[in-house]
Image (tube, coloured by chain):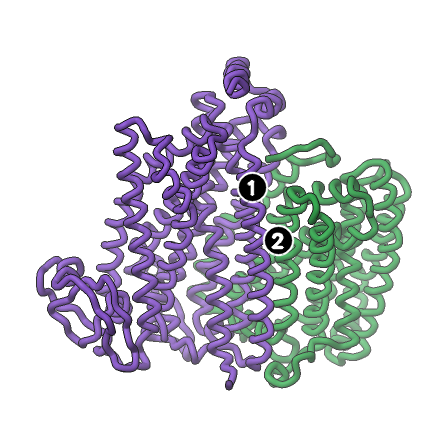
Chain colours: A green, B purple
Amino acid sequence: MDLVLFYFLLLGFAVLMYVLLDGFDLGVGILYPWFDQEGERDHLMRSISHVWDGNETWLVFGGVVLFAAFPAAYAGILSTFYLPIILMLFALIFRGVAFEYRFKAHRSRPYWDFAFSAGSATAAFCQGLILGSIIQGVNAEQISEASWYWLSPFSILTGFSVMAGYALLGASYLYMKSRNRIQQHAAYLAKRLVIIVMLAMLIVSLWTVLSSDAIRARWFSGWNFLYLSPLPILAIVCAILAWRGLQNTAHEIRPFWMAAGIFTLGFAGLVVSLFPYLLPNQLTIWQAASPDTSLEFLLVGIVIFVPLILAYTLWGYRVFAGKVEDYQEGY
Amino acid sequence: MELDTALLSRLQFAFTVSFHIIFPSITIGLATLIAIWEGLWLKTHDPRYLQLAKFWIKPFAITFGMGVVSGIVLSYEFGTNFSKFSDIVGPVLGPLMAYEVLTAFFLEAGFLGVMLFGWQRVGRKLHFFSTVTVAVGTWISAFWIIVANSWMQTPQGYIIVDGQFHVADWFEVIFNPSMPYRLMHMLLASFITATFVVAGVSAYYLLKKQHIPFAKKGLSMTMWIALILTPLQAFIGDQHGLNVQEHQPTKLAAMEGIWPAQEENVPLLLFAMPNMETEQNDYELGIPHLGSLILTHSMDGAVQGLKAVPPEDRPNVPLVFWSFRVMVGLGFGMIALAVVALWLRKRGSLYNQKAFLTALALFTPSGVISVLAGWYVVEVGRQPWLVYNLVRTSEVVSPLPAERVLFTLIGFVVIYTLLLGVYLYFMRKLVKKGPPSMSHLEEQLIGMKAPGYALAWVKNLKHEDGAK
């Protein structure tokens, strides 16, 4: 197989893992304002404090895979989206340190609550902004001219969509990991979020197809739509199954997996639309790729370590399997 | 004043990387110490070791958290602020950093959850294994980042194709000439940094007459470690210096304040104000010939000075010169303390010599400061190059408007200053709170299903500590 294509798939895998894993813990942060009791907030944070670090490592991994395999794209994308990226990093700093300090704080606890939820929401929104701007495409000249080219009605829409999507992952995660009142409240929120997310995906899809000739051709020329129709159809099936799982706690694990399914299908649709570009109409994966000596050298490590990483990450999740317990546990 | 994107980007990178390095230089050593204590506890069941591990794991956790969030910034900052650099060296540095994530970051993150929160979820041996894995992960991480940095100092194993660096030989890239020295020097520096943090806090408790058995154990252990590691570090540092002299003579000349293109009688300067305008030192005070002796191991060995290269190829001399002296000065201070500790130990007054304990408490941040100073020597000393003699820093910055970089730089300064304050506040809070009591450990041991004799030992000490 073409090595460049392999790295493109790997990059996609890293981004998807990031979106699903950090998605649910950012989502829990986004939902903080809807859980206003001290005990509830303790519970929410405890449900993710042992995994957020590993989840965020996928963001670093995505970044370095881009750097190693597609340096021109790493350079182009990061400098083009300078402000939203730095803003996202600021937000991730605030929410990350909140994990350490909130439990040790007393008087300053409300500030850490705010840092955690505002940081989570801002990071998700920035990621959505960047995503929307990449879909729309930017020219290199814009970097040095206007500062706000990444802020458009469309990118704001994708910003809120990503926030809603992460919130859905977070709510269905809480539905799986919690009991009683928190679980019920998570179900209530998740149901509304399923509707919001499906609507957002519909609007974003229509908008993209209507505004870009290339993407319209990709989906609707010849028999393409017939081959691609499983993507939207399966997403609708996932949404329905998630909804039904939220009705009945006998299926408390299912909504999380269905929400992950919706994300995966949406992401696949995005890849279909943009391939083979890393920056639309500017940089294809082959133009941006590193030489074979670099790709081959890293391939060895990927083949050995990615399966290992998946194995011990899974083990880590299993150690903390089941409901989150509220007694003081830890270091 | 005209704003300069290159200068602002450099300032931002320098500021964010300086802030970041504080935390890993503590956690690499502290993770290792915690693993040692936990292992000793498993082997001997002496609850004091468990108490040490359990106490220090808290500062470790917040330090590690600070390292994670400030590290993510760096992995993106190459692209945001030095886009041309990322593009041309990506094929070399990208895979090295990808290996760091694959072999270290995931490993640390994957086992950190169990190390911090899993005491009662996994068996004692599996927990120890997790702690060791986190410690080993920090070493592996140091390895890869030092490889990448060292390649920028002493590049080899590459070919340039269309202006981009491609790798001809990965072995040469990884085992570049300065890597082994820098790696040893940095790992030792981290161990010493953590050692002096633990020693400083233990000394503080002894001065305050609090948690005395706990503090004695911590102090005694760390002073033995310091006695071995600090002289070893001086030796490795000297070797590293000779390596710099061979491969980066201009940096060495800045470290020592040597101006003439060829100097045969190099003094060891104790004080000087290097003046880059007049190309000489003001207020120079030094010991004749000693510099030559250290650098060339002969009384009048010749050393290349700063004037051997044109002014635009020289680093900021005063900064390198003084950073080097801060690092070496603190290093000798640490050696002196370790030796004094040995002498006091022989006299039986290690735990109650007030002046010594005060000095040790003041030396708590000495490791961190030396590490920062040392990195300034390394990084400022490499300027004006990003890749030594090949890529000029000013030519590879992102084409961003200066105001935008100024805006984010101010953001970083404000946020990081705030965070450093918060970090120190919580560290102080943890120290004030003190180690977990024996009755607290007893409860946790029951949760861990520890054997009966381990529990009996804790019970015993509970009465002893209670009696005091």
Residue toward you, A194 or A104: A104
Q: Which mark is residue A56?
A: 2
B379 and A131: which is toward the camera: B379
Q: Is residue B103 above or below residue B299?
A: above
The quarter in which the C terminus of chain A is drawn is top right
Tell me what residue is drawn at x 56 percent, y 60 percent.
Answer: B417
Q: Position of residue B355 (x, y in %)?
A: 35, 39
- Tell me where residue A325 sits by quadrant: top right
Q: Residue under circle 1?
A: B112
Task: For mark 2, name the chain.
Answer: A
Tell me the residue at 68%/56% (across/down).
Answer: A19
Q: Determine the image quadrant of residue B419.
A: bottom right
- Left or right: A97 with respect to B75? right
Hey, what amino acid is under mark 1?
Leu
Looking at the rendered structure, whether the residues under marks 1 and 2 are on a common chain is answered as: no
- The residue drawn where x is 86% and y is 63% is A199
Instruction: Locate residue B66, reporting x and y percent.
Output: 55, 52
Relative image position of residue B269 (x, y in whole percent): 21, 64
Amino acid type at circle 2 is Glu
Which numbered circle lies on residue A272?
none
Q: Quadrant of the N terminus of chain A?
A: bottom right
